[in-house]
Image (cartoon, rainbow, N blue to C red):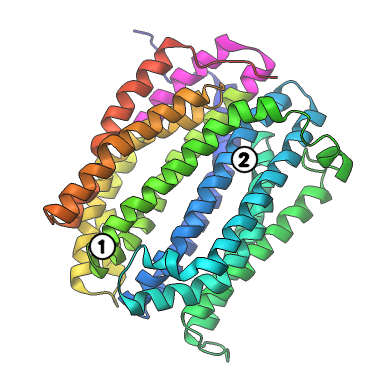
């Protein structure tokens, strides 16, 4: 067995990891804190409002996953172009991501405005919940257009060593969002009491501020994103074929994954308002738990991508193994924290029912047990396989266990046998075990590392 599995003696490696991880983690930490405050504030209106906003946000969640898929594929190219010091290649890829993300956002906005009621009712049969969800979605969905700019620019900064800029813009947007939530949901500081509509306005304005500040930061400094119009769009489709070859599996993977999660959430919604509201609370602990784990996975994608572009496969293999051990170690540490401390977070939602709080606490414990599995799967699929261009195999490993095991098992346990929420939630992680087996096999074969540019 190799002695230094984590490469602790390689200071340069950990400097790279730290430079990428820290801004991403800080951004996610503040984002999660704000999300937690948002849900507590909306939860203060009652279970119906909390469930309604949660149902409305399922469409935004699906858009986020699609944009993550588009820019995730682009990040593979941007990281390798940057490793080769090919700045025009980075900017052409950024332009293509902007075009594709913009088209995706317009489509989702049209669905939200034209079929918002139908979308919300997929997750709840209760008229009051659906009404609150539509009220929120009609306003908040205009923020999708700002997301279509934030995602590509955030991706190029993270792929080229400027991850702190999207962190700063995101933090400013989130602070604005939280402040307006405080003012508009309950009518504080002389503002009108708008309830769910106030939360939607706050979300929209926060997204606009995030986008504006990120563009200002991008062009005020000498960054890879400081591109003229012609650098972005003159030859925007020149590299479309190789981009699609790598990005299409990523986009399909993330889109079908997101659709699968919507199906899972629809199952939770059909189990009752208590169960669906509980899952919205579990989402806050979920986001807190994944901060460090996603930071490591994203750092793996950037470091391995830059390494493949600059020096080739040998170093990429070494770094891939280090990230595996690092994610396993950190995943276990976070799991212990969630199972001992995180289970008390649901009781902060004092205006929800005791049944909702209990369901959320029990489900949080199940989530904590599964965190090491999630950490390894995320690092392998997003950080290692995708960064090496092995996106088709990554998509197969990611999706088949969800659709063959997790979703049918959840429907059977939750809707047919009518077992409580924690048992239904645990069905997702049966698939995680299967996914990890095939992900580890693919990683150790070494077929994933490819130079794409």
Q: Position of residue 195 (x, y in %)?
A: 47, 82
Q: How far apart, in angstroms, are the residues tagged by discs 1 and 2?
A: 33 Å
Is 21 in front, or is 214? 214
Q: Is residue 127 left or right of residue 190?
A: left
Q: Position of residue 233 (x, y in %)?
A: 82, 41
Is 342 in front, or is 407? 407
Mark 1 packing: few (<14 Cα in 10 Å), some, or many (20+)?
Answer: some
Q: Residue at x 52, y 31 (%)?
A: 249
Locate the C terminus by quadrant: top right
Q: Is residue 144 above or below residue 292?
A: below
Q: Residue at x 26, y 67 (%)?
A: 347
The residue wearing badge 1 is: 270
Residue 319 is a magenta residue: yes
The residue wearing badge 2 is: 71
Residue 311 is a magenta residue: yes
Q: Is residue 88 above or below residue 215?
A: above
Q: Residue at x 47, y 85 (%)?
A: 186
Q: Position of residue 272 (x, y in %)?
A: 23, 67
Q: Is residue 300 visible?
A: yes
Secondary structure type for disc 1: helix
Q: Residue at x 56, y 26 (%)?
A: 387
Quadrant in which residue 100 is drawn? top right
Residue bounds of the magenta highlight: 306-330
Secondary structure type for disc 2: helix
Magenta segment, prevailing SS (helix, strand or loop):
helix
Q: Position of residue 148 (x, y in %)?
A: 65, 52
């Amino acid at each position: 067995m190799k002695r230094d599995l984590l490469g602790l003696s390689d200071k340069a490696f950990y400097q790279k990891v730290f430079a990428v991880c820290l801004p991403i983690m800080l951004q996610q930490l503040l984002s999660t804190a704000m999300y937690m405050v948002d849900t507590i504030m909306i939860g203060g209106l009652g279970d119906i409002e909390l469930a309604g906003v949660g149902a409305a946000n399922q469409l935004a969640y699906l858009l986020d996953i699609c944009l993550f898929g588009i820019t995730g594929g682009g990040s593979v190219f941007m990281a390798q172009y940057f490793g080769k010091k090919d700045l025009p290649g980075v900017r052409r890829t950024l332009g293509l991501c902007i075009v594709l993300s913009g088209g995706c956002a317009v489509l989702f906005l049209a669905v939200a405005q034209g079929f918002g009621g139908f979308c919300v009712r997929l997750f709840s049969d209760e008229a009051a919940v659906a009404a609150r969800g539509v009220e929120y979605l009609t306003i908040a969905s205009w923020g999708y257009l700002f997301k279509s700019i934030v995602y590509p620019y955030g991706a190029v900064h993270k792929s080229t060593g400027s991850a702190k800029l999207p962190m700063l813009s995101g933090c400013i947007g989130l602070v604005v969002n939280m402040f307006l939530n405080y003012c508009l949901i309950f009518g504080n500081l002389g503002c009108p009491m708008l309830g769910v509509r106030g939360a939607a306005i706050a979300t929209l304005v926060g997204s606009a501020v995030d986008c504006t500040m990120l563009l200002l930061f991008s062009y005020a400094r000498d960054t890879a994103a400081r591109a003229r119009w012609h650098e972005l769009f003159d030859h925007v489709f020149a590299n479309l074929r190789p981009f699609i070859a790598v990005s299409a599996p990523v986009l399909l993977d993330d889109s079908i994954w997101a659709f699968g999660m919507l199906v899972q959430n629809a199952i939770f919604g059909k189990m009752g308002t208590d169960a669906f509201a509980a899952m919205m609370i579990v989402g806050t602990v979920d986001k807190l738990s994944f901060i460090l784990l996603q930071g490591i996975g994203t750092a793996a994608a950037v470091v391995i991508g830059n390494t493949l572009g600059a020096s080739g496969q040998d170093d990429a293999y070494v770094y891939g193994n280090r990230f595996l051990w690092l994610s396993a170690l950190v995943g276990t540490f976070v799991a212990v924290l969630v199972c001992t401390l995180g289970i008390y977070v649901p009781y902060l939602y004092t205006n929800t029912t005791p049944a909702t709080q209990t369901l959320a606490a029990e489900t949080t414990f199940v989530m904590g047990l599964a965190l090491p599995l999630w950490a390894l799967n995320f690092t392998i699929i997003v950080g290692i396989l995708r960064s090496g261009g092995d996106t088709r195999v990554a998509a197969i490993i990611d999706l088949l266990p969800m659709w063959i095991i997790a979703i049918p098992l959840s429907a059977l346990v939750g809707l047919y046998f009518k077992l409580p929420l924690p048992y239904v939630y645990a069905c997702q992680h049966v698939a995680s075990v299967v996914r990890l087996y095939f992900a580890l096999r693919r990683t150790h074969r070494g077929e994933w590392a490819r130079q794409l540019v």
